[in-house]
Amino acid sequence: MKEIVVISGKGGTGKTSIVAAFAALAGKKVLADCDVDAADLHLVLNPRIEHREDFSGGKKARILEDECIACDRCLEECRFDAIHYPVLGNGKTADTPYINPIFCEGCGVCVRVCPAEAISFEPAINGERYISSTNHGPMVHARLGMAEGNSGKLVTQIRQEARDIAERDNLDYIIIDGSPGIGCPVIASITGSDLVLVVTEPTLSGQHDLLRVAQLTAHFRIPAIVCVNKWDLNPDITEQIEEEAKERGVKPAGRIRYDNAITKAQIMKTSVVEYTGGAVSEDIKTVWQNVLYALG
Ligand code: SF4
Ligand code: SF4
């Protein structure tokens, strides 16, 4: 079983369209959408949810008004400034403080310092995790609540679920739509995988993003290859990107030309290789062949 992660330096590079095309091209596989902060693989693959589970990224503190003696110890100790006295409609402040769940980082300090045991500390439900079926096999994905953190933990859970399915069903590939950027969620997306495919665009920011991602994959010693999407919009930068990538041990995986068939396929909720047999589909098929080659 091989785990392939498709990532990009930032969102909107066409990464998800490429993952959807791989879903149509690959043999026995499970799909995983680890781009949990902007999950949109489901928009193309139309998953039918078969199993759902709550996701808890951690605990949140909540003050029990009836127990609170308003000693302010929690306000003094909260380093995240999450506790304050709310101002009421009449301009006065409330008798007991309130913990803003958006700012609460779940460190538990207030719970420990409260002399009146007036703070509850329960797992917060931050989203939902799903196992679904698609026309191209099983898919693991999630929905994270607004402004919820801890997406790295959710990514780890999604990958583990996908691995369990791949082992159970004796599948050959786990194809992951990874988080963009270089933060905690992308590290959770790529660590321990067999291959990272970096998708970038031929712009100066795409060039810069690629270098940052290449540093990351090198640091974690994960083999990486790069594909330039919409390469024909700037052939010179495409060449520079491929050269710089090679210098950092990241081999080219092929170029994908600009074609609005990709957008049309998305609108039709299908992958581009199913939507058109045109040249852009051939580009993506070549990239997939190079992925297989790089996997060995
Ligand atoms: S758990 Fe930590 S972050 Fe949350 S309110 Fe208490 S002290 Fe502040
Ligand atoms: S430390 Fe406990 S008793 Fe004191 S203000 Fe905070 S919640 Fe109320």
Image (cartoon, rainbow, N blue to C red):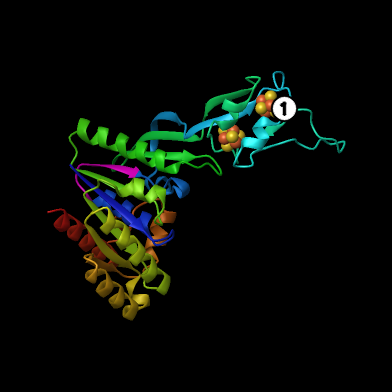
Q: Compared with residue 105, is residue 236 higher up or lower down, i.e. above or below?
A: below
Left or right, residue 204 beside residue 283: right
Residue 38, x across and y down, in percent = 46, 49
The residue under the point 26% across, 55% down is 196
- Secondary structure beneath dot 1 equals loop
Which segment is the magenta one?
A: 26-32
| Residue 138 lies in quadrant | top left
- Furthest toward the right, the residue is 90
Mark 1 close to ligand 2, CB under 8 Å = yes
| Residue 109 lies in quadrant | top right
Queried whether the magenta region covers residue 31, the answer comes back as yes
> Label 1, on which residue?
71
The residue under the point 36% across, 63% down is 212
Q: Residues within 10 Å of mark 1 (few under 14, many from 20)?
A: few
Left or right, residue 287 beside residue 84: left
Q: Nearer the viewer, residue 161 or 57?
A: 57
Is residue 57 visible from the viewing direction of this image? yes
